[in-house]
Each structure stands twice: as C-alpha cells, then as structure tokens.
Amino acid sequence: METQELHRGRLIDHVQLVVRDLGASQKFYGAVLEVLKVPPGGKGDGFFWADEICVSSVDSPSAEGKLTGRNHLAFQAQDEAMVNAFHKAALANGGTDNGAPGPRPYHPGYYAAFVLDPDGNNIEAVFHGAAQRSAPSVKITF
C-alpha cells in the first residue's frame, strides 16, 4: 500500500448544526465529545460549541429559523477502544445505532462506528490505524 499523509486543520473552519432540541443534543454531544477527549468550548444564547463544531437551536440568531437537515460528521478517534467508547456513550445519551464498531472496507486499518444523533445526523468516530503524527493537533493562537 502507498504511504499516505493526512493533513488536518486546512479545510473546515467550523460546522454548525441547527437542532430541534438543544438540551437533547447537548447531552448527546457532551457525552461523545468527552470520550473523544474534546473539551467543551462554551455556551451562549441558544448554542454550545466545542472545537470546530457549533450546535444551536433553531431560534438562535445564527440559525435564521431553519434546521440544517441531515449531515454526516466523522470525528477522529485515537484507537479502536475510543471508537467503542464513543458508540456506547452515544447510545446511552440519545443516539441510535447506525453501524456497530468494527472494521470498514474503505482502506486497511479503518475502524469506525456510526450513530444517529437526536436529529438524525449520521455521526461517526473513526480510527484510521496506527500512524505517526507530527503533532497531536494544530494549535492556533490569536
């Protein structure tokens, strides 16, 4: 297999999900992001955020009164155990199974789990297999 390099932090600045029930989504995302070791960012009037994801209610000023619809988001996991923990936490906090943890045929070493969040968004946690990173993340200081 050809060596691949993955570069993170160059394409997506942030993703906003506009949801029907902010409390249900906060419970769901709070639990799954905790097992993925993503610290909470903060809360505001009708929204909460962590890292590059913002979840807001339909009546928040940035939502303009419209739900975002069905999306697929994939979060990086450090290992297969983290994928398994993500799936378990998601199901215990309002998520619905959409693909149990296990290997996928996308490329060798791809191990993932899929759940539907309370609004039907397809949320994935994926471990791409053993790899060497130059740094654990990109750090941006303003």
Image: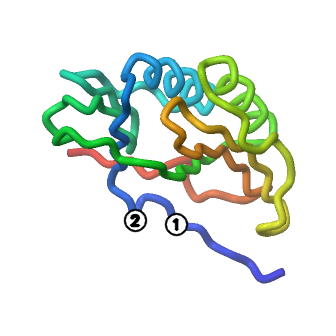
Please tell me in which quadrant of the rendered image residue 58 appears: top left
Circle 1 SS class? loop
Residue at point 58%, 46% (across, down): 122
Residue at point 32%, 42% (across, down): 67
Q: Position of residue 88 (x, y in %)?
A: 74, 25
Q: Mark 1 and mark 2 in contact? Answer it, CB < 8 Å.
A: yes
Which quarter of the rendered picture does the N terminus lie within? bottom right
In the rendered structure, find residue 10 and report the number of the disc placed on it. 2
Looking at the image, residue 46 sits to the left or right of residue 32; the answer is left
In the rendered structure, find residue 75 and report the number of the disc placed on it. none
Residue wearing tag 1: 7
Q: Position of residue 42 (x, y in %)?
A: 30, 23
Please, what is the three-letter code of the amino acid marked with disc 2? Arg
Find the distance from the CA under tag 1 to the CA under tag 2.
Answer: 7 Å
Looking at the image, residue 71 sits to the left or right of residue 99; the answer is left
Please, what is the three-letter code of the amino acid marked with disc 1? His
Circle 2 SS class? loop
- Asked whether 1 or 31 is in front, the reply is 31
